[in-house]
Amino acid sequence: MFQKENGWKTVDDALKEKIFAFSEGYKQYLDAGKTERLACAEALRLAKEQGFTNLEGKESLACGDKVYFVNRDKNLFLAVIGEEEVEKGISFVISHIDSPRMDVKANPVYSDGGLTLLKTHYYGGIKKYQWTAVPLAIHGVVVKVDGERVQISVGDEPGDPVLYISDLLIHLATDQMQKKATEVVTGEALNVLAGSLPEKESEKDAEKEALLALLHEKYGITEEDFLSAELEIVPAYPAKDVGFDRSLVGAYGHDDRVCAYTSLQALFDLNQPKKTAVCLLTDKEEIGSMGNTGMRSAFFEYAVALLIEKTVGSYNELKLKRTFRNSCCLSSDVNAGYDPTYPEVMDKMNAAFMGRGVVLTKYTGSRGKSGSSDASAEFMGKIRRCFDTHGVMWQSAELGKVDCGGGGTIAQYVANLDMEVVDCGVPLLSMHAPYEVASKLDIYMAYKAYCAFYEA
Ligand code: MN
Ligand code: MN
């Protein structure tokens, strides 16, 4: 008989202390990195502290070298060079650092009824109604026409104002309350309240003029500069412990910074590995891994090609292909945790439970595994053995009931490169909501799983 239980039952005081301590660092990482750019910058800062140096600046690489490669400020590729030749295969752990949110439109500013607002376009799959009437922050960059890059971050520092999206008052919501949940709040209703003071001399759009004047004074930007900006609207609250016993963590962006942080720490704590170990933080997963910072970008192959060239002094396509063919990857992404309030979407025999450890997801997809990579039995066996011998608490799950919906990860794009790959991450409650929940035990076990994988 095979049955898994609540993992906390076997956790002694010493381990509990380690698990709780680990989540403190994780919460700090979450608060420092609410966008892909900020999450990349914070990870880079941590990597430099650990002695990682710039891959592009190095003539050659030797066993034990620790290097980083930053792609367009949105991806971080970290490698620890192994004893074996790179061509013998790399151990990859790949997560994503983009999360669902709202992006400020290119022509965003308008005023109406004495208020100034910013129009947005949501990014990734969200229940739009969840993002109204909560405190919001803005983070991002504006690139001026002369090339100067201006950073904007408001809403997350103590004493900062926040931004806000209004919702219709219940008293007048008779019609709204009859609508389907997908239509209760439409995409074009996600307008961000950004001010209300008018320019006193102005006759038309006095509030808009005042906001633009304020932004010009503070950041030196004009209305036209929004055309070359990436400004992201995210929840303004910090990560916090959840529950009387503090056993869970609530935060924006667990998906997928929980796997990013745990894989980073696993790489940092790795002693000289046999195989070269790579931790990659990627972008654009939430919109299909497109673009030059997504997992489908040739950037990934370029970074691996650099490792080959700088370790053996030469490069050819066959070496790159052989490297991928000999490599293994944990596509480290979150899964759905069993929610006792919504049991109807889960097959309890194949669901992930909070506090039972990191989740191996053999396949994802929808409508009969469509869009899934589906890891081989052989590779699943290898990873099971690896986790069991290293004392990792882990569980196996699908993403909900068959035909209840579904989803995909970067695993399929990794598999296309001829690698072994399986999804492995942390179960969450309320995935893609402004505030998601993860178990501290599962977070720690993801870290242990990635440590075990790199060491194997
Ligand atoms: Mn994800
Ligand atoms: Mn997601």
Image (cartoon, rainbow, N blue to C red):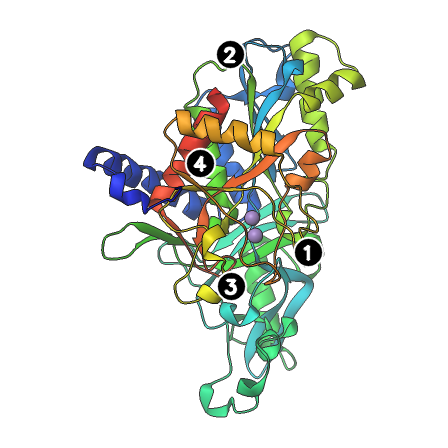
Name the residue type under label 1: Asp
User: Marks 1 and 4: in contact by CB < 8 Å?
Assistant: no
Residue 237 spot, x, y in % from top left:
40, 58
Foreground mark, 1 or 2? 2
Residue ID for mark 2: 64
Return the residue nearer the eye: 365 or 115. Answer: 365
Q: Please rate how many residues cluster around mark 4, counting C-alpha atoms within 10 Å: few if below 14, some from 14 to 19, many from 20.
A: many
Which quadrant of the figure contains the N terminus?
Answer: top left
C-alpha gap between disc 4 and disc 1? 37 Å
User: Marks 4 and 3: in contact by CB < 8 Å?
Assistant: no
**Could you tell me if residue 46 is visible in this image?**
no
N-term-proximal mark, 2 vs 4: 2
Residue ID for mark 3: 345
N-term-proximal mark, 4 vs 1: 1
Q: Is residue 332 above or below residue 143?
A: above
Residue ID for mark 4: 262
Q: Secondary structure at mark 1?
A: helix
- Whether residue 323 sits left or right of residue 359 in the image: it is right
N-term-proximal mark, 1 vs 3: 1
- Whether residue 167 sits left or right of residue 72 in the image: it is left
Q: Secondary structure at mark 2?
A: loop
